[in-house]
Image (cartoon, helix red, strand yellow):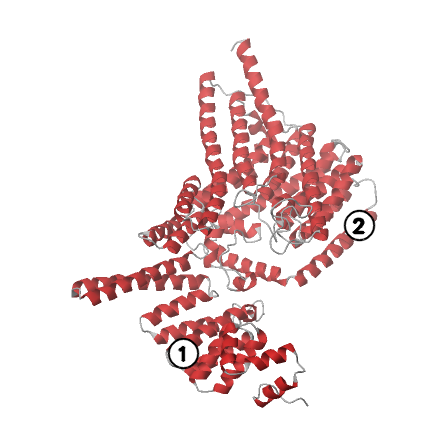
Amino acid sequence: MNASTVSDSSFFQKVLKNIILYGLPILYFAIAVSFYLGTYDSAQIKITLLQCGGLFLLMSWLVLKVEQADLSFFKSNFIYLIPILLFLVSGFISFAGSPYKLVSFNEFIRRFIYVGFALIVITEFDDENKLLLIKNWLIFAAYVVCIYGLMQILDYKFFPKDPNGFGIGKGLDPFLWRQAFAYRAMSTFGNPNFFGDFLIVMSPITLALFFRKKNLYLIFLWLLIVINTFATFSKGALLGLGSGLVVFAVVYVLTFLKDKISRRLKSIIIGAVLVIVLGGLGTFVFTLSMSRTDSLSFRVYTWLATWDMINTNPVLGTGIGTFYVTYPAYRRPQIFFIEGKHNTESDHPENEYLEVWFDEGTIGFAIFILLIVFVFTLGYKNLLYLQSGNGTRDGPLAYIQLGVIAAFAAKLTHDSFCVSLRFVSSGVMLWLLVGITIAIAVQLAKNKIEPKKINISKMGKTAIQAVIILVFGYGIYFFYGYFTADILHSQAIQLSKTGSWDRAIATYDQVNVLNPSYPMSKYFKANVFVDRSGKGDLLNAEAIFKDLWTNIAPNYVQSKYLAGVMYTKMFEEAAKTRAQYIKEGRSKEVIEMQTKIMLDAFNKAVQRFNEYMMIDPVYPLTYYSLARMYEYVGDLKTAEAMYYKHLTFPQTLQQHPHDIWKEDWASRRASDYAETYLQIGNFYMKHGQFQAGKEAYLKSLALVPNYMLSKKNLTLALAALHDYAAVRQQWVEIYLIDPNDQDARKYLQNAGILQWLDAYRANPNDQTAINKLLSLGILKKRQ
């Protein structure tokens, strides 16, 4: 190799090293502070930055390693890399065995990038100045997000939100999402829990760096971090904050003060910290929990369901990233009462340990625990070494490691109760902490590395590098498509709302091409076809549902219910056509064929409704839809049973094994059950059961006393039973609730009562009106 070639190679390596050295900290800064409100998910920009930026950095790193053609570092320090490489292998095996490859692929790519970041930090950030570069960018990011978080706190305090919307530009926060979480600060993260997760990582890191040089800008930032953490009102974040501070204090006393104070004083300091931090934060968290018990019960039921899921495949797991597509079949019904919604999904179980266990089984879970124990042990040993006299006691490495080990504890505490490491803003931070700890250990180990070049020609290097660039370049292009898809998905929703069906469908098609693993766009496209119900639309929707259930999410939100609606429409069309054939005198064979088509649609509708009822036994429209289907075919007994099945379901939640959290769940959805009594009352009236109809309407009103529709329909039942005095009384009550109700005014006008009621309402002392109403029995004599 000539001098020119060596020079060219060295320059190329220098460029690549600088790209990595500055690119990684800047990428971390960008992930923390970025958001984009033009996409459906405001955090999609963070995901895209990880996918595209992360792949670019890994591409640069791999090209550098090929250029260096030297594996001596990995051979000398392989022992430090084993736990993270095992976790990467666990993720790959889980992906290979996953029944939903499209879903698992996205999560495995994140695992690949996360581990890649750790490897980059370990291999390239090989001195304290380089690690301080990461620290500086993180401090910068913390300042940005904390100042914006403070702005949100003040915005809520002094500029109440417009009740008709978010109120763009009407407060300190200039963005569309202002006060989206009311009093809870979310900064640039779009969610208070994600914001809290970043803050609790930065809290001990900032505090440790302050302890080193006592810079005021660091203690000021730490105070901002604490204020913002409390402002998130995230119980998990507050527990993480406390955990980080306790570990910080304990480790500081046991290492930095190891030879400086007595054992008794150490015990006093540690005890005081435990009492003050855990006692104070514990009291606050307990008070907060008691004011929002739904948060606790939600987690209890989610964890119970996750445990059931783990036991379906406990050894190898179901597949990395498959929690959210599997969970609906195991979700406890109480979740629907707690959330009050039916078209939402839980992406994660609010506990990273349970999710790893479900995804990758006991083997993968054991590797995850091994990684955690390894990092904690290594970090503590790093500090002992640095404080032993062999290292630099007051150098930056010691304080960086102190902050990192406490941040690691804070993060893992938070991830036991709240956000998952699968979210980008959370995941990148954990793997940075892992990478920094191992990087410090490698620096302290000072393993003698004998450079040993791999014998490979320049042409061979170039060929390998070209393959790396092509593969990773395509990956960057592919994942940028996800970002474009999220923008188009938002546009498609707006087109659907305005009835621009063709444009909406075309836009959803673009989304599905750019991001084939996006279940929502498929579901929404099917919804457009079902809503429009033009020629061929229902068959198109049917094909989408089959693809969605087979390849991505077998029980995606309300897709089974929507499929039931689709087949109901098919049934109604087939029944209408059959009636037309009979009217036209078509042949027996033609009518029988149409009857078969009709019954096939009926059976499929019933099947899909029942499947959705198994997933969500709380949703009332499923029961109503089934009741109407059975009523249509003349099975009145089963139709009636469907209404009562909805009404009696909450009783099952008072029985084992559903009664772990005692509560009268039905009271949360009183309006739903009032509606069901109204529906069954209508059913009875339609079939001449007037007394049963009356009783159903009264039960509806017992739940929601001012439910106008039930009161009006009750008048019909009373009239059918010839109880005209009660009919009049009901209309008077409706008038008293809403004097402008036109139905009430019309009845009372015809009854000759309206003028007296209006006069009495205008002047309660109008004696003539009082006497008239007393004579009619509408008013009672005053005692």
Q: Position of residue 668 (x, y in %)?
A: 56, 68
Amino acid type at image mark 1? Met
CA–CA distance between discs 2 and 1? Answer: 77 Å
- Give the numbered dot on residue 267: 2
Answer left or right for 164 relative to 63: right
Amino acid type at image mark 2? Ser
Q: Residues within 10 Å of mark 1 (few under 14, many from 20)?
A: some
| Circle 2 SS class | helix
Q: Contact (CB < 8 A) between labels 2 and 1?
A: no
Answer left or right for 602 relative to 320: left
Location of the C terminus by quadrant is bottom right
Q: Residues within 10 Å of mark 2 (few under 14, many from 20)?
A: some
Residue 439 in view, yes or no: yes
| Circle 1 SS class | helix
- Give the numbered dot on residue 685: 1
Residue 106, placed above or below residue 616: above
Q: Position of residue 356 (x, y in %)?
A: 53, 49
Can you tell which quarter of the image residue 135 is in? top right
